[in-house]
Amino acid sequence: MKKLYLLILIWIFFSFNVFANDTFLSLKKDKVNVRYGPGFEYPIKYIYKKINLPIKQIDKKENFRRIIDLKNNSGWIHISQLKKVNSIIPITDKILFSKPTNFSKPLAKIEKGRVLLIQNCNNDWCKIKTDKFKGWIKVENSWGLN
């Protein structure tokens, strides 16, 4: 009987853990429709006009993904408009460094809310690219990473 309870508890834990795993994605195009429901027959709720904007997938139904953004806007987007995450948005102002350490040369101040393209990450640092700069930022307090 104890084994049965243990198996049930393990099953419940893993079931909830699978459903709780949210995934970050990015917008593939510079104009993406967000709909009220998971289908083209649902009306457009709003339109994103920012390529590479990171969003969080919170549900899926067939070829549509329910998403939420940094400002808690939510809706449904067709999977063809999404790609693996390749960007982050800092929630606080950041300093861009030449190497992944606080002791390296500071290159620029990155203001919160700016979309940054990720080139690669290691531990708490990501190499990012902006319009004018490339360098490393500490990714704590950033939206868009799993």
Image (spheres, helix red, strand yellow):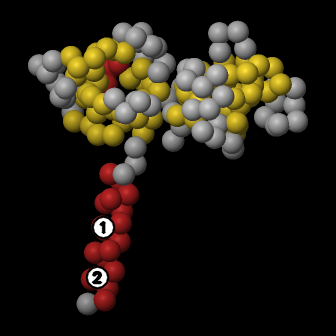
Q: Is residue 101 visible?
A: yes
Q: Amino acid at mark 2?
A: Tyr
| Residue lying furthest bottom | 1
Residue 9 in percent (x, y) is at 32, 74
State which quadrant residue 31 falls in. top left
Q: Is residue 11 above or below residue 134?
A: below
Q: Which residue is mark 1?
A: 12
Quick one: label 1 or label 2, which is nearer the N terminus? 2
Q: In the rendered picture of this protein, how many numbered marks are placed on residues?
A: 2
Residue beneath the point at 73% across and 18% down: 134
Instruction: Classify mark 2: residues with Cα within 10 Å, few (<14), some (14-19) or many (20+).
Output: few
Mark 2: secondary structure: helix
Give coordinates of residue 94: x percent, y percent: 69, 29
The amino acid type of the residue labelled 1 equals: Ile
Q: Is 130 on the left-hand or right-hand side of 25? A: right
Judging by the rendered image, the residue that carries numbered circle 2 is 5
Task: Give left or right: position of 62 versus 111.
Answer: left
